[in-house]
Amino acid sequence: MNKAELIDAIASEAKLTKADAKKALDAFIDTTTKALKKGDRVALVGFGSFSVAKREARKGRNPQSGKEINIPAKKVVKFKAGTELADKVK
Protein backbone atom coordinates (compact mmCIF):
# COMPACT_ATOMS: atom_id res chain seq x y z
CA MET A 1 0.00 0.00 0.00
CA ASN A 2 1.43 3.36 -0.97
CA LYS A 3 0.66 6.77 0.56
CA ALA A 4 -2.18 7.58 -1.88
CA GLU A 5 -3.85 4.23 -1.19
CA LEU A 6 -3.45 4.78 2.56
CA ILE A 7 -5.07 8.22 2.28
CA ASP A 8 -8.00 6.69 0.35
CA ALA A 9 -8.40 3.96 3.00
CA ILE A 10 -8.28 6.46 5.89
CA ALA A 11 -10.82 8.72 4.14
CA SER A 12 -13.23 5.87 3.57
CA GLU A 13 -12.81 4.28 7.04
CA ALA A 14 -13.13 7.58 8.96
CA LYS A 15 -15.68 9.10 6.56
CA LEU A 16 -13.40 12.07 5.81
CA THR A 17 -12.60 13.84 2.59
CA LYS A 18 -9.36 12.78 0.94
CA ALA A 19 -7.96 16.27 1.61
CA ASP A 20 -8.69 15.94 5.35
CA ALA A 21 -7.26 12.42 5.46
CA LYS A 22 -4.09 13.66 3.73
CA LYS A 23 -3.76 16.52 6.24
CA ALA A 24 -4.19 14.08 9.15
CA LEU A 25 -1.63 11.63 7.76
CA ASP A 26 0.87 14.39 7.00
CA ALA A 27 0.41 15.81 10.52
CA PHE A 28 1.03 12.36 12.03
CA ILE A 29 4.18 11.86 9.96
CA ASP A 30 5.53 15.35 10.74
CA THR A 31 4.81 15.08 14.47
CA THR A 32 6.33 11.60 14.71
CA THR A 33 9.42 12.72 12.77
CA LYS A 34 9.95 15.72 15.07
CA ALA A 35 9.59 13.57 18.19
CA LEU A 36 12.07 10.99 16.89
CA LYS A 37 14.55 13.73 15.94
CA LYS A 38 14.45 14.90 19.57
CA GLY A 39 15.12 11.32 20.70
CA ASP A 40 11.61 10.74 22.06
CA ARG A 41 9.74 7.46 21.74
CA VAL A 42 6.30 7.45 20.07
CA ALA A 43 4.04 4.74 21.50
CA LEU A 44 0.59 3.93 20.15
CA VAL A 45 -1.04 1.47 22.56
CA GLY A 46 -2.13 -1.68 20.73
CA PHE A 47 -0.38 -0.67 17.51
CA GLY A 48 3.31 -0.35 18.37
CA SER A 49 6.10 2.06 19.15
CA PHE A 50 8.68 3.99 17.16
CA SER A 51 12.08 4.73 18.70
CA VAL A 52 15.58 5.78 17.71
CA ALA A 53 18.58 3.54 18.37
CA LYS A 54 22.26 4.21 17.85
CA ARG A 55 24.10 1.75 15.64
CA GLU A 56 27.82 1.60 16.43
CA ALA A 57 30.53 1.90 13.78
CA ARG A 58 31.68 -1.47 12.49
CA LYS A 59 33.74 -3.20 9.84
CA GLY A 60 32.02 -4.73 6.84
CA ARG A 61 32.91 -6.29 3.52
CA ASN A 62 32.18 -5.18 -0.03
CA PRO A 63 30.34 -8.23 -1.41
CA GLN A 64 31.74 -7.73 -4.92
CA SER A 65 35.41 -7.31 -4.12
CA GLY A 66 35.61 -8.82 -0.64
CA LYS A 67 37.51 -5.72 0.46
CA GLU A 68 37.02 -4.63 4.10
CA ILE A 69 35.23 -1.30 4.56
CA ASN A 70 34.42 0.91 7.55
CA ILE A 71 30.71 1.45 8.20
CA PRO A 72 30.18 4.66 10.24
CA ALA A 73 27.99 4.92 13.34
CA LYS A 74 24.47 6.23 12.76
CA LYS A 75 21.03 6.55 14.29
CA VAL A 76 18.27 4.28 12.99
CA VAL A 77 14.50 4.28 13.48
CA LYS A 78 13.03 1.11 14.97
CA PHE A 79 9.42 -0.04 15.10
CA LYS A 80 8.19 -2.65 17.55
CA ALA A 81 4.71 -3.98 16.89
CA GLY A 82 2.23 -3.98 19.76
CA THR A 83 0.57 -7.17 20.98
CA GLU A 84 -2.82 -6.39 19.39
CA LEU A 85 -1.26 -5.69 15.98
CA ALA A 86 0.92 -8.77 16.14
CA ASP A 87 -2.07 -10.95 17.07
CA LYS A 88 -4.21 -9.56 14.23
CA VAL A 89 -1.48 -10.15 11.65
CA LYS A 90 -0.94 -13.80 12.65
Image (cartoon, rainbow, N blue to C red):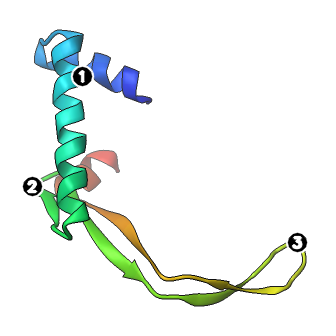
> Residue 74's quadrant in the figure?
bottom left
The disc at residue 45 is: 2
The x, y position of residue 71, in whole percent, is 61, 82
Estimate how packed mark 1 is, as few (under 14), some (14 to 19) or many (20 or more) residues with alpha carbons within 10 Å.
some
Element on which disc 3 rests? loop
- Number of the front mark, 1 or 2: 1
In the image, taking residue 73 as reference, residue 6 lies left or right, namely: left
Marked residue nearer the N-terminal end (1 or 2): 1
- CA distance for labels 1 and 2: 23 Å
Estimate how packed mark 3 is, as few (under 14), some (14 to 19) or many (20 or more) residues with alpha carbons within 10 Å.
few
Q: Residue at x 35, y 50 (%)?
A: 90
Query: Given the image, on which type of amino acid does mark 2 rest?
Result: Val
Query: Given the image, on which type of amino acid does mark 1 rest?
Result: Lys
> Residue 64's quadrant in the figure?
bottom right
Query: Given the image, on which type of amino acid does mark 3 rest?
Result: Gln
Nearer-the-camera pick, 13 or 29:
29
